[in-house]
Amino acid sequence: MRGDVLFEPGDEVTAMIFPLDGTVVSLIVPLEEGRTIETATVGREGALGGVVSQGYLPAFNRAVVQMGGAAVRLDAARMQAAKRTSLPIRNALVRYADCLLAQVVQSVACNAAHPIEQRCARWVLALHDRLATDVLPVTQDMLAEMLGVRRTYLSGILNRLQAQGLIEMGRARITVRDRPALQAASCECHRRVQEHFALVLGATFTPAGTLVALDPEGAPDPLATHGVISA
């Protein structure tokens, strides 16, 4: 359900969680002053917990369900056994870990360098990518928490985006009205993460921007492309 905490910093991660259609989880860093900052969004394209490690290691951040729905939970030990016996599974998880790190790194740069208006547009686009609908079930309180700003300040930004015809505000929802214009209002961070997903994981997006498929086996093989350096 929305608001459920999957794990907190320091919790032992004993399972991998794979969100299914419509389920979205945020990776959040809680600060001592009380604010929280989102560093990554994970939907049906990804997984949480022990993506690279064998699991059973302490979590560094908080994982919070933003859009409730179905998910698959797999014990870390079983996932580790699958990675040992299946090269495609291991390859897919390593490639996804690379993409998740790229999203986190780009988020850090975005939070440090770009104005809140562009960051807000980027967050709405990231959610739109993962949901097969233009109507995003997100409240202003939720969005303000993800961006680490006051709700009253965020309301003014959303009202300006609505006045420009990019979005439409509703009760507990934001409707995307003009995605190309919303992309233009965003910074380059959303585009760069999408491009990395396409290159590394073979991600396919609809013209509207929705993520529809991943093909890590069909993505370029860096060793085949650039050769292997041997001793």
Image (cartoon, rainbow, N blue to C red):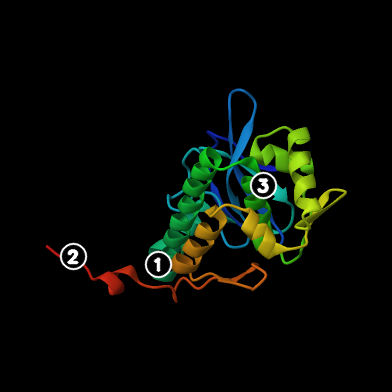
The amino acid pointed to by label 2 is Ile
Q: Residues within 10 Å of mark 2 (few under 14, many from 20)?
A: few
Instruction: Return the x and y of residue 106 as percentages of the image width and height.
Output: 49, 49
Position of residue 33 in the picture relative to residue 66 (left or right): left
Give the camera-side residue of 144 and 230.
144
The image position of residue 109, as x and y in percent, is: 49, 43
The residue where tag 2 is placed is 229
Residue for point 72% across, 67% down: 132
Q: Within 10 angstroms of label 1, few (less than 14), some, or many (20 or more) residues?
A: few
Residue found farthest to the right: 171
The residue sitting at 64% across, 73% down in the picture is 207
Instruction: Determine whether, in the image, residue 5 is placed left or right of residue 189.
Output: right
Q: The residue tagged with tag 2: helix, strand or loop? A: loop
The mark closer to the camera, 3 or 1, is 3
Q: Do labels 3 and 1 touch, CB within 8 Å?
A: no
Q: Nearer the viewer, residue 4 or 219?
A: 219
Task: Tell which circle, 2 or 3, labels the residue nearer the N-terminal end.
Answer: 3
Of marks 1 and 2, the one in the foreground: 2
Amino acid marked by disc 1: Thr
Is label 1 in a helix, a strand or a loop?
helix
Q: Which mark is residue 85?
A: 1
- Quarter holding the C terminus is bottom left
**In the rendered image, the vertical position of residue 84 relative to residue 16, given as above or below:** below
- Nearest the viewer among 145 and 228 is 145
Label 2 – label 3 distance at C-alpha: 43 Å
Single out the mark in the foreground, 2 or 3.
3
Is any part of residue 63 visible from this angle? yes
N-term mark: 3 or 1: 1
Mark 3, residue position: 120
Which sits earlier in the primary sequence, circle 1 or circle 2? 1
